[in-house]
């Protein structure tokens, strides 16, 4: 299907991909995915499409009509897009959001690779096994849903979810409690936790330009504890810097972005994603 095009130019065999978002022009997905296609000699091109909410339906119909092989979907379309697909994978349905669409001859299937991308990044980059681990998640929004669902499949001993709005943490814990021992709490209850093996931030607190903010100042970092942040702008948040100074193992957010893309690439092409090439392409782009 992917007729090689070693010159790396677009021709009449080029298979098309893209990302739908609003806004979208800050996205690093085109740089990352095109580097991956180039590395594997696949004749494909990936672009960013600024799709407004009232045009999402038309855009998805366009994927079928124009025979795009796949698209990623980002903010604010991850929930809305589900109604326009032919099938939604079970995990994506439970999470309630789709970030990857695969087009098999006009049949569109939606997946969520955010959570599984996070877990693959965590395991690859820290070498840790999550079985039996005590996990604390800060935040209970859309990103937390995908990540908690994927973490819950790894047989942790417990997942405690803390959120500014406690009710949302309790609700997310309830939704995921069929997979693992999950509980919800308010942020103030974090100060009582001293036995966590992994603590991760899924909120936007600490993201550029508010880089001096931390999501939870009342967590007590322990040497050897893994502390992880989904934010990758900045590459290392203030919160992760503090954790590192306290002897914790730091896991940065760029990995989740890379591996959610790696899974999408693998679903579309059936080939292992060249993750290090993708990482270098994104890092270069972030530095420019
Ligand atoms: P995303 O899809 O990125 O997860 P979201 O669904 O809007 O975005 O969720 C944002 C998360 O960050 C929520 O858990 C939110 O807490 P609330 O449920 O109380 O709103 C959390 N969050 C955002 N800004 C925050 C802040 N300044 N302090 C604490 N938590 C914050």
Image (cartoon, grey):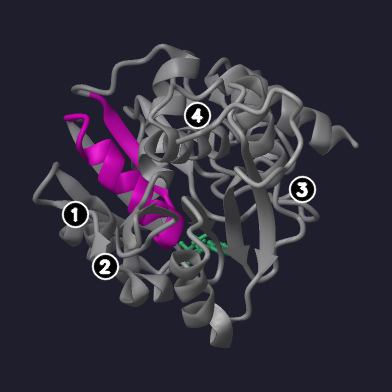
Q: Position of residue 73 (x, y in %)?
A: 51, 60
Q: Is residue 183 visible to us here?
A: yes
Q: Position of residue 260 (x, y in %)?
A: 47, 39
Residue 37 picture quarter: top right
Q: Residues within 10 Å of mark 1 (few under 14, many from 20)?
A: few
Q: CA distance from mark 2 to mark 1?
A: 13 Å
Taking the view exactly as shown, the residue that stands out farthest to the front is 12
Residue 263 picture quarter: top left
Residue numbers of the magenta segment:
133-155
Q: Is residue 151 magenta?
A: yes
**Which is more foreground, mark 3 or mark 1?**
1
Residue 110, above or below 113: below
Q: Tell which of 83 and 155 is nearer to you.
A: 83
Looking at the image, residue 186 sits to the left or right of residue 262; the answer is: left
- Of the numbered discs 1 and 4, the one sitting upstream in the chain is 1
Q: Tell which of 117 and 168 is nearer to you.
A: 117
* Contact between labelled residues 2 and 4, with CB atoms less than 8 Å apart: no
């Amino acid at each position: 299907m992917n007729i090689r095009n070693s010159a790396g130019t677009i021709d009449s065999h080029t298979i098309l991909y893209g990302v739908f978002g609003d806004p979208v022009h800050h996205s690093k997905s085109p740089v990352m995915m095109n580097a991956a296609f180039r590395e594997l000699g696949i004749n494909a091109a990936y672009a960013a499409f600024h799709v407004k909410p009232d045009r999402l339906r038309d855009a998805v119909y366009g994927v079928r009509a124009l025979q795009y092989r796949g698209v990623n979907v980002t903010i604010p379309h991850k929930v809305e897009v589900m109604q326009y697909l032919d099938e939604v994978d079970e995990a994506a349905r439970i999470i309630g959001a789709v970030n990857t669409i695969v087009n098999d001859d006009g049949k569109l299937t939606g997946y969520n690779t955010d959570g599984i991308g996070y877990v693959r990044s965590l395991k690859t980059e820290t070498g840790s096994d999550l079985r039996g681990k005590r996990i604390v998640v800060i935040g209970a929004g859309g990103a937390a849903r995908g990540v908690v669902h994927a973490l819950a499949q790894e047989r942790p001993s417990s997942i405690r979810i803390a959120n500014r709005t406690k009710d949302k943490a309790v609700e997310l814990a309830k939704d995921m409690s069929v997979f693992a021992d999950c509980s919800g709490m308010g942020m103030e209850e974090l100060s009582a936790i001293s036995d966590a093996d992994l603590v991760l931030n899924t909120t936007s607190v600490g993201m550029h330009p508010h880089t001096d903010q931390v999501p939870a100042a009342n967590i007590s970092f322990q040497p050897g504890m893994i502390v992880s942040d989904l934010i990758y702008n900045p590459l290392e948040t203030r919160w992760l810097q503090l954790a590192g100074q306290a002897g914790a193992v730091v896991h940065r957010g760029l990995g989740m972005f890379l591996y959610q893309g790696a899974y999408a690439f693998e679903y579309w092409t059936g080939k292992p994603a060249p993750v290090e090439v993708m990482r270098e392409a994104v890092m270069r782009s972030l530095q420019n």
